[in-house]
Amino acid sequence: MAETKANNSGATDGSGFGDYDFIVVSNRLPVDRVTGEDGDNSWRRSPGGLVTALAPVMAKTEGAWIGWHGAADEVLKPFDHDNMRLVPVELSADDVELYYEGFSNATLWPLYHDVIAPPEFHRTWWEVYKAVNRRFAEATADSAAEGATVWVQDYQLQLVPKLLRELRPDLKIGFFNHIPFPPLEIFAQLPWRRQVIEGLLGADLVGFQRPSDSSNFLRCVRRFSGHTIKSQHVNIRTDDGDRICRAGAFPISIDVDQINQLAQSPEVIERARQIREELGNPKTVLLGVDRLDYTKGIQHRIKAYGELLEDGRVTVEDAALIQVASPSRERVESYRLLREEIEGAVGRINGTYDTLSNTAIRYLHHSYPKEEMVALYLAADVMLVTALRDGMNLVAKEYVASRTGVNGALVLSEFAGAADHLKQAILVNPHDIDGLKDAIMRAVEIAPGESTRRMRVMRRQILQNDVEQWSQSFLRALDGETLGKTPRSGDE
């Protein structure tokens, strides 16, 4: 692995090139800072599928990862961690407020999630978004070797491909959008729609979670740019010659081996038993695991469950719902209000139906390590994924992967990308509260044989399409191979 460069550009000679043949660019670096008991700081690899998928590629190449390290107004030099060169990009407190909390998460996030919450359009946010994207592009241009492959990640950095191509036309550039891409009629609301489209078209390949997202993008390209589209290819004419940007679906997946190993660990199995015991060993344990976000449909799920209790179709003696809601964007007002709304609903239901021995809803506003999450998956008879809009939803896939006993039931929103592949789940429209109640009861009452048949098909789909397969299929396509086929659905 290359050492820290003597100059800021990363170039070792007068070529203007850096040393790294493969570069990942994302809003955050793949590490978290941890403080030991002695007060010393160190770095720990972040959990998550993206890091797991790309770490092997980094190990095999002269790889670098470019991103913010998580602390505002702090300048860090590049450093090495786990066979990766990490190149921190500085963000000021104003950058975090305007680029990240503002344009990324109060403009783009709600816009791209079907305007479930109203997006805000502020020119000051847009100006900072542009400036930060340029900073990321310049850091990448300084670090990349001649002809390197660069993979830009997600909606916070949609301008980077074009900016980077202007700086380094020799690079091979891919972009992956982890969240949905909205229909033309919604995307059209964005005042800077043309600039975002042109930013993305700087890539050689733009990847999405679902074929519908790719189609939405190409419709927007056709409407807001003058480029010709043929099939999945956008023909871009420039003063420097013609080039092609391709778009396609590359649905992300999970680290199946990790989940399988944890699900068979005696410690995790024992912890799952303890969880059920702590709940009073109810006949049925239902589970929801979400980041606390208005796109996840937590309110709809809790409303439906509360009505099932009111109707007498479930009782606190026989069933318990665990709702894990990981803290998210707690400085944003809409998220604080969402938390108050959800906790108020849980309090009302528990106040009405709890007994001295049983709780209707065990609400947990925490983040948990992967071992505890898999124990929760094992403890749950029914998994509830009721997202109003979701790019993929890896929780659904993790639950299925954890069911090594080939049992359990998954209630899955048709508006989550995972519904394209896990068609043996009990699919539901979460806006339909009566339909959601019926789906929950269908899962609670499912016959063992039907449960096994459905789970076996879904597990096969996930085992054949893990997170490494996802990264390799994208990189092969970026390298010039034919766009990959969408993984087989669970009903095949």
Image: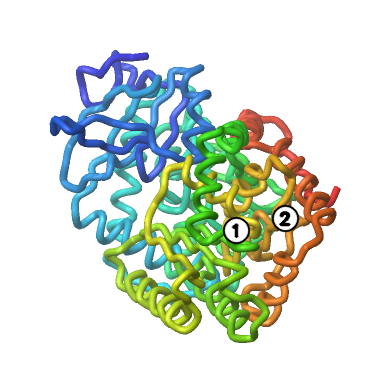
- The x, y position of residue 129, in whole percent, is 33, 56
Q: Is residue 232 left or right of residue 358?
A: right
Circles 1 and 2, Cβ within 8 Å, touching? The answer is no
Q: Does dot 2 land on a helix, a strand or a loop?
A: helix
Query: Based on the displayed image, in which of its 4 quarters is residue 419 positioned?
Result: bottom right
- The x, y position of residue 181, in whole percent, is 57, 59
Residue 145 higher or lower than 385, as above or below = above
Marking on residue 420: 2
Q: Which residue is mark 1?
A: 221
At a point 56% along the width and 73% down the height, the residue shown is: 316
Camera sees residue 398: yes
- The x, y position of residue 351, in whole percent, is 42, 81
Mark 1 belongs to which amino acid? Val
At a point 44% along the width and 75% down the height, the residue shown is: 346
Residue 48 higher or lower than 57, as above or below = below
At a point 20% along the width and 17% down the height, the residue shown is: 6
Q: Does dot 1 land on a helix, a strand or a loop?
A: helix
Camera sees residue 478: no
Mark 2 belongs to which amino acid? Asp
Q: Is residue 397 left or right of residue 114?
A: right
Marking on residue 105: none
> Which of these two is toward me, 247 or 365?
365
